[in-house]
Amino acid sequence: MKKILNEELRIVNIGLESFSEALAEKNVGHVQVDWRPPFSVAESAQRALAAGLAARRKANARAVAKILAAQPVLLGLKPAAAAIPGMKKNMILHAGPPVLWKNMCGPMLGGVIGAILYEGWAKTPAAARKLAAAGEIEFSPCHGHQTVGPMAGIVSPSMPVFLVKNETAGNMAFCTMNEGLGKVLRYGAFDPEVIQRLRWLGKILAPSLDEALRLNGPLDLKMIIAQALHMGDELHNRNRAATSLLYRALAPAVIRSAATPETAAAILQFINGNDHFFLNLSMAASKASLDAARAIDNSSLVVAMARNGREFGIQLAGTGDEWFCGPAPVPDALFFPGFSKADANPDIGDSAITETNGLGGFAIAAAPAIVQFVGGSSADASRTTRKMYEITVAENNVYRIPYLDFRGTPTGIDVVKVIDSGILPFIDTGVAHKKAGLGQVGAGVLSAPAEPFLKAYAALAARCNPKEKKR
């Protein structure tokens, strides 16, 4: 005690940072502890999950082993109707949990109008709206068809999709090609230039890339992702390195496969001019990896996080295909000139599949440039990734972060750890204008909402103890 009294005392502050800020203003030495209380849940649910701890640990170990063992490779491209299980001639897939046409947000509504125009089912946006409202088109979530879609996530029967296979488990995943930034279908734009670009993607780019992949052979996406993490990407909001690696791998085959030298030049110029071209492949690779961990009883691991522009939903390995949803938040973002948060639609898209797989916001320490979107620093990026280790069950054995001394990315979100720690998944995201037809207005970050995780926690507890369902 005497020794302590003779040393300089320092203040430790837990919780509210405003106390630390006041001490800092007076130059008083202190330590701020980043802590928050766990979420409030029913004691009976806690008891049910505690009783099943051994089974849950075993199930989670099995689930995360399947995720880590996944070997996603790119095989080629095909029209969605020929590739995607359950795809119908009158069906349009969308991002996030299920949503009816009448409840779709602006960007998703705009994406549907664009898809109808692209398919030739209607000639004007007004006619497309009328057709969609008439109930003749079937809408279904991408995730229900082994598919993921960025932002509005719109996939119609004629659109070409990447074919990604998890060679370890044998399951497939699908995703459309990335159109670039600004006024594009995935952000809800449907101008003639948007439809014209989609038709070029379908008629020129997709068949040439498919042939290039046939000449080149399957492309190892896991190795590209691992290398890109070493080169400053986090594989969600920043895909510059991964796109460059893909370009280098396929350029010789594209030159050989394209119909003319001018076509080859146009294809390579398009990929070179679109730093996000690899994003859709990062998503499909993550989907193929995580789907291998589905249908494992007692597992509390999250296998999907997705948003439809109104609701944020998650699915667990141990609760089947059930969605657990809550209102989607509006991201904090860097907005394009002339736009502000007032223009932004609530968070939207299946792209949070990358965070679910330990990339994106979970790997943001590999890409500190991303936090500059919201005025953050490299230290903020490092702290964020370190915090994600507290809600995951493993570290990736291939995806590693140089800035963290090549530590593996935090992998396998455990809904029980989320609730017990009060820490929510951190997500990078793009921002769409809330009105249909206006496209992208910015990009930023956000924390997932708590409600889906609380509902998933309760549902898992109910499976452990059926009496929970009656409460």
Image: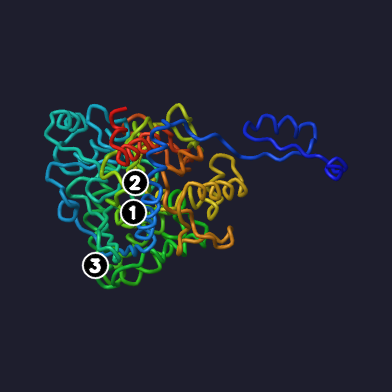
**Alpha-carbon span between mark 1 and mark 2:** 8 Å
Task: Identify residue for label 2.
Answer: 304
Q: Is residue 36 visible?
A: yes
* Labels 1 and 2 touching (C-beta < 8 A): yes
Give whichever of 131, 256 is nearer the camera: 131
Estimate the x, y position of residue 278 in percent, counting from the top left.
Answer: 38, 56
Estimate the x, y position of residue 116 in percent, counting from the top left.
Answer: 19, 39
Three-letter amino acid code of the residue under disc 3: Glu
Task: Name the N-terminal-most of marks 1 and 3.
Answer: 3
Task: Name the N-terminal-most of marks 2 and 3.
Answer: 3
Would you say 137 lies left or right of 191 here? left
Three-letter amino acid code of the residue under disc 2: Ala
Task: Identify residue for label 3.
Answer: 211
Which secondary structure, mark 1? helix
The residue lying at 28 percent from left, 68 percent from top is 212
Task: Name the N-terminal-most of marks 1 and 2.
Answer: 1
